[in-house]
Amino acid sequence: MTSLVPRVVLVSRQTEFDGLLAAHGTRGQAAFFLRAREQCLEPLEERHIRQLSAIDSAKRAIPREWSLAQVERQDLDRFLFMPNDIVVAIGQDGLVANLAKYVDEQIIIGVTPEPDRTEGILTSLSVDVLPDLLLDIGRGRATITRRAMVEARLGEAQSLRALNELFVGHRSHQSARYIVRYGGAEEYQSSSGVIVATGTGLTGWAKSILTATRRSAEFDREEQKALFLAREPWPSNVSGCSLTAGQIDAQTPLSLFSRMDEGGVIFADGIEKDFLRFDWGLEATITISDRALHLAV
């Protein structure tokens, strides 16, 4: 923290109820749209109200002499975070993951408005703890964990960080073609892309791949390690499937060389619109990032 008076930044995302109102104009039309599909608006409206209530409670928890800013997830790439910010993410776990690459040393508090619906990996806290927790952070007395992140670099000019996982592959359902270099070995592969997951990410996308392939992997969310997994590699006369998984750490990076004429991408934490182009001839070097997510617990 700096010597400046803290600013609390509340981050949320549009609810499904908001989206329906934006699409259909009125509550009645949104309800009619769902009824025609044998669905109900009320559960979505209830979740919407719970989120608004959590945001309102979070505002009341902020000390009077501190300042406040609000931003929605879709505007994060245009929002300027300040060194004195304390960021309160109100929503599901994915919101904190989406936020991670936009902050530096700022402390994040993950708050769930719906304890019964969250996995509690990143948004495990109730809004009720905010008054005391904000003061503890301001006084430097809070418990903060440093969640490891991974980073993809394309030369010196372009990079992308992720808290859960990076995806390297084709933007469509076409096969991703690339050369993988890892641990002194090299292989040309054609697959559905490569996932690189942190310890935090092992509970997400990587978990489904590990389950489907009957593999196991476990390391702490703060450990400077990551796991890469090739998705559905295709064995052929020219492509192999022997380098399909491995651990990345400070001594062992992963290098991927694109062999895709066009459509190659690298994106982080499920946000496909925020990507690096990864077309023919580009090399992606994937390492543990020197930055971490500072998460209050």
Image (cartoon, rainbow, N blue to C red):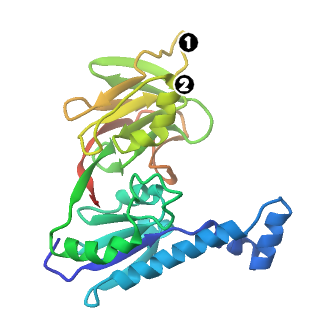
Q: Residue at x 70, y 74 (%)?
A: 21
Counting from the top left corner in percent of width and height, residue 182 is at: 31, 24
User: Which numbered marker is on residue 232?
Assistant: 2
Q: Position of residue 297 (x, y in %)?
A: 28, 60
From the viewer's side, name the closer residue of 107 and 182: 107
The amino acid marked with disc number 1 is: Ser
Quarter of the image that includes the N terminus = bottom left
Crowding around mark 2 (Cα neighbors within 10 Å: few <14, some 14 to 19, many 20+) is: some
Number of numbered discs overlaid on the protein picture: 2
Residue at 31% across, 17% down: 185
Task: Judge left or right: residue 178 versus residue 21.
Answer: left
- Residues marked 1 and 2 touching at CB (< 8 Å): no
Q: Secondary structure at mark 1?
A: loop
Q: Residues within 10 Å of mark 1 (few under 14, many from 20)?
A: few
* Mark 1 or 2, closer to the camera: 2
Q: Which residue is at 33% across, 71% downward?
A: 129
Q: What residue do we see at 13% from left, 79% from top? A: 3
Q: Is residue 290 above or below residue 55?
A: above
- The residue most toward the bottom is 64
Under mark 2, the amino acid is Glu
**Residue 96 appearing in the image:** yes
Residue ranking furthest to the top: 237
Q: Mark 1 = which residue?
A: 236
State the image quarter where residue 244 is shown. Answer: top left
Answer whether residue 259 is visible to the viewer in this image.
no
Q: Position of residue 49 (x, y in %)?
A: 58, 76
Gap between marks 1 and 2, in whole Å?
A: 13 Å
